[in-house]
Each structure stands twice: as C-alpha cells, then as structure tokens.
Image (tube, grey):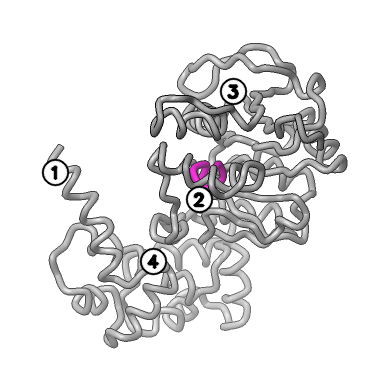
Amino acid sequence: MSATRKPTIALLATPETSASVLYGLYDVLMSAGAVYPDMISGAPGDELLDVKIVSADGKPFHCVGNIPVVPHAGVGDIETPDAVVVCDMYTSIYDVPKGRYPCEIGWLKKVHSEGTLLSSVCSGSLLLAESGLLNGQEATAHWAYRDMFQRHFPKITFRNESILCLAAEGERLVTAGGVSAWHDLSVYLIAKYCGYKTAIETAKVFLISGHSEGQSPYSVMTRPMESSDGPITECQLWIAENYATSKPVEKMVQKSGLNSRTFSRRFRAATGFTPIEYVQALRIEEAKQMLETDDATSDDIGISVGYEDPASFRRVFKRGTGMSPAAYRKKFQRISQLAKVN
C-alpha cells in the first residue's frame, strides 16, 4: 500500500440493508482523523480513510425503509479495497438467502484472494457463509440466526455470544453480531488502519463504548416447532407449559414413546438443542422476563422456573446470559424505567 494513499473501505449494500448500519458506518469511518480535532481545537483534521458505498451494479436504489442509496461504484468498477464491510441484509430466520447474491459473492471471493479483509455486520455474514470462506472458521451474526447457521452452514462454528468475532482474523475474516455491532466493527477498522489513538478519539466523538458483555444478555430463545417429527413436536408443546417440572427430560422421553438415545438424537435434529439444553434455555428465558419486570428475589425466581438450588440457578443463568441474575436485572430494569419515564 502506498504511503500517500488512504486505505479504502468498501461498504457493500443491497436493498435489504438497514440505513442505520450503512450510513452509521459511513459517517463514523469518514470522520476518522477529521472530526475530533475540530471538536477540541476548531480546526478539522484530514480524513484518514477513503470510504465508498458499493453495490452489485452501482445504480441508485432504496434500502430498508425506502431510504435512497446512491453508491459510489459497482463491485466491478472499484479497485481492490483494503477492507470490505458486508452490511446487514435482512432475511427471515426461516428463509435461507442462498442464491440471491451471486454477483456480490463472486466479488467478495475475488477481492479476498487479492488480500482484502472481509468483514460483516449481522446477517451480512450469511453472504460470507455462502461463499464458503467461513468454512472451518468461527463466526458470528445476530443471535437469531444461530439455528440457521447450524442447519445450513454446519462447517462454521457459530458464536452467538460474540459481538465481534476475531477468531478468523488471521484469515482476513471478521464478523460482527447484531445490527448495532457495527459500532464495535467501526472502531476495530479505524484502529487497524488509522491507529488506536484515532480509534479512541473517534469513539469519544460518537459516544461509542462497545458491547463488552457480548450478545448473550440480549439473546432470546427462538423456538420453531418441528412439524415433521410428531413426537418431538408434542414434547416441545408439552415442555413449553411444564418446563419447571422435575426430571423434565425423563418425562419427555416417556411421553414420546421412544427410547432415550433415539429421543435425544431426534430432538437435537429437530431443534438444534439437546433435550436438557432446551429445557434450560426455556427456564432461563422465563427467568429473564421475570427479572426484567418482577420484584421477586432471584432465588424465588429460580425456584419458580424449576431450580430448587439457588447456586445451580445462578450458574446456569450466567452460562446462558454471560451475567449473574442480579446484573441482568440491573441492566434491563434500567431500560424498563426509561420506558416508563417516556
């Protein structure tokens, strides 16, 4: 890279992209080096990054919310960038977007082979997954896509707790979690190409503090019913109302009429969870909702969802959310209080 050339970061967008991700990234990355000096001395500095919005053909379009986007270039009209951010491309958790973006995927594979760092925000990692570049790697996206990754991209280890997954950084692949994880990715890219000092200064300008607790506190269990396996569907329906019962897995096995090994295999194939993981996830989901709105003690909440031993409840809860019940309550009741004020 020439010493006089700014690093180029391409933001890959489609009509399924959120305007908040696309324009948020553009504003923050474009400000690196320029806005902070202006704020403290009244003299703007130099923009340190060349940020371009690109699309498959470079033609204007409207993204989610009918917001206009005028790309700087099509993917075939831009020199190999230093980095690409695949912006989020909304898709239902039931609708695998394979085959929708052949032009974009071909370009991503090409520039990656030429040395470009590829990154993604939220569902943008589905493009990287379809390209095959993430095979054998760890990656993240919004927590709601966990089951989709496990079912349709089994060669990828999905890290649903991660906000910014750097496990494949050595392969020039970085993935970010939910939509607002672009904050963390933007700071990472500024630090990489402009230095940590500029990254910290930019974070101060935009009040970006990162998501140090990861995605786990925000995640919610998705529970699609498996209609093709009758006994498993019946057990899912039953446990949804009886998760606090004692020996829940044993009772589901009895209800299914299957032997224990067959039941466990079919349950995991249908839900993506082992039976006990499924029960624990249901219990923790209910406990989270109670902690958000209820004044009962955490020990009482643990008992109400099926944990007689408070220590066991705290241990399982922290494993599932990354936080203790007390810390979770403090975090989300604050949001609840703000909602009541407004």
Does 183 lie within the magenta span?
Answer: yes
Task: Give x and y (percent) for residue 135.
Answer: 77, 56
The residue to which callout 3 is attached is 15
Q: Amino acid at mark 3?
A: Pro
Mark in front: 2 vs 1: 1
Task: Give x and y (percent) for residue 20.
Answer: 47, 30
* Disc assigned to residue 169: none
Q: What are the residue bounds of the magenta stretch?
A: 181-186
Task: Give SS at disc 1.
Answer: helix
The residue to which callout 2 is attached is 144
Q: Amino acid at mark 2?
A: Ala
Task: Give SS at disc 2.
Answer: helix
**Rounded to the nearest whole Å, what is the CA distance between mark 2 and mark 1?**
27 Å
Which tag, 2 or 1, sits closer to the chain's start?
2
Which tag, 1 or 4, sits closer to the chain's start?
4
The residue to which callout 4 is attached is 282
What residue do we see at 24% from left, 63% from top?
329
Which tag, 4 or 3, sits closer to the chain's start?
3
Q: Classify 10 Å Cα crowding around label 1: few (below 14), some (14-19), many (20 and above).
A: few
The residue to which callout 1 is attached is 340
**Rounded to the nearest whole Å, what is the CA distance between mark 2 and mark 4?**
15 Å
Q: Amino acid at mark 4?
A: Leu
